[in-house]
Image: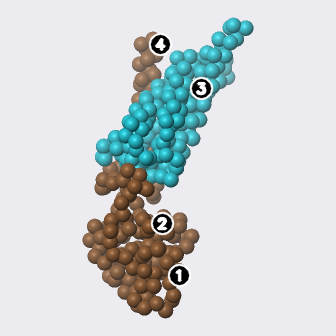
Chain colours: A brown, B cyan
Amino acid sequence: MSARVAIRTAVGALLITLCGSALGLAVNALRPAGIPLVAPFPYQQDCPDKVAVPAGPTVSGAQARALVRAGRALLVDARPADAFAAEHAPGAVSLPFSFIAPPAADRLATLRGHGALLVYDDSPGDKLAGLLAAQLRESGLGDVKVLSGGLAAYRAAPRGAKP
Amino acid sequence: MKLELRALLGPWLAWLFRVALGLVFIVASLDKVAHPGRFAVSIANYHLVPQAAINLMAITLPWVELLCGALLVLGLWHRAGLLLVLAMLGVFITAITIALQRDLDISCGCFTTDPAAHGMTRWTLYWDIIWFAMGLHALSLDRGLLSIKRLLRRTKR
């Protein structure tokens, strides 16, 4: 390969990198689910299975149902938006947990003034709910609890349950 | 007969390797293009990239892979594309080797960003080395057979 061809190849490779990067940045800026250019907080996990869920207060399905019925709590669904769209507990709000971006300030503001926030998911060990609950507590929301057993426990709880 | 065999092992095999590598890179990029957030987690799992660069890499790298793959398949700027593919494979081989040495229980994030995907094994590394060798062969012997550039040139004539 002559020096001229080598230089042309290297310049071409650089141009492809620049074009590909520009395309990626443009698409990310335009798509609604685009991610921030710099992660706003450190990635904490080796892999999702190894993530330690921070300990925090929990409520049972029956307690959750009674609190919601009394207007003293709001259910928060930590599952992805498509899972929420498929099925969710009545009155629940969707706030999918994300390692990449914690909930935005305006989203957090809508969660205030509803009493306790009862976070649920449908994963084993309520992992997503536990992580989102910790994120919400770190964001300054005081009364955040995990609904132990998730959506299934809420569904299974008797409707007339007392807190 | 000797000449035919040489041609088969030379430019035509190089063309086959170039197109195969292009398809591999296109397929590898699709899930990452669709899920940059999940790909960012895959990158973070390697513990090699600085925090500030993880998202930027997750946003840009899949598109560079996709563009490279498309150019290799079409035979446009194929030398530059092959050089870039070799550079990327070199980085992947290094990252996978380090992850295997550290015994990290992570999925490689090569073709899928699904965290539940199969964990990385030595075969992940071997495949990357095979692709690297294919890329080297194609870079040194590919004459741009069946490329858009050649087809356009023929049409002009």
Q: Amino acid at mark 1?
A: Ala
* Image coordinates for residue B34, horizontal then vertical, percent: 51, 50
From the image, tell me which residue sits under label 4.
A1
Q: Amino acid at mark 4?
A: Met
Q: Chain of mark 1?
A: A
For marks 2 and 4 on the same chain, the one whose residue lies earlier in the sequence = 4
The Cα atoms of the two marked residues, 2 and 3, are separated by: 44 Å
From the image, tell me which residue sits under label 2.
A124
The Cα atoms of the two marked residues, 1 and 4, are separated by: 71 Å
Tell me if mark 1 has few (under 14), some (14-19) or many (20+) residues whose alpha carbon lies within 10 angstroms of its own. few
Figure check: A142 above or below B133: below
Residue at screen point 47% across, 73% down? A150
The one of B96 and A18 positioned closer to us in this rendering: B96
From the image, tell me which residue sits under label 1.
A156
The one of A60 and A14 positioned closer to us in this rendering: A60
1 vs 3, front mark: 1
Q: Amino acid at mark 2?
A: Pro
Q: Amino acid at mark 3?
A: Phe
For marks 2 and 1 on the same chain, the one whose residue lies earlier in the sequence = 2
Q: Are marks 1 and 4 in contact (CB under 8 Å)?
A: no
Looking at the figure, which quarter contains the N terminus of chain B?
Answer: top right
Position of A78 with respect to B18 (left or right) is left
Asked if marks 1 and 3 fall on the same chain, the answer is no
From the image, tell me which residue sits under label 3.
B17
* Image coordinates for residue B146, horizontal then vertical, percent: 65, 24
Looking at the figure, which quarter contains the C terminus of chain B?
Answer: top right
Figure check: A77 above or below A5: below
Tell me if mark 4 has few (under 14), some (14-19) or many (20+) residues whose alpha carbon lies within 10 angstroms of its own. few
Residue at screen point 50% across, 75% down? A151
Could one spot residue B131 in this view of the protein? yes
Q: Chain of mark 3?
A: B
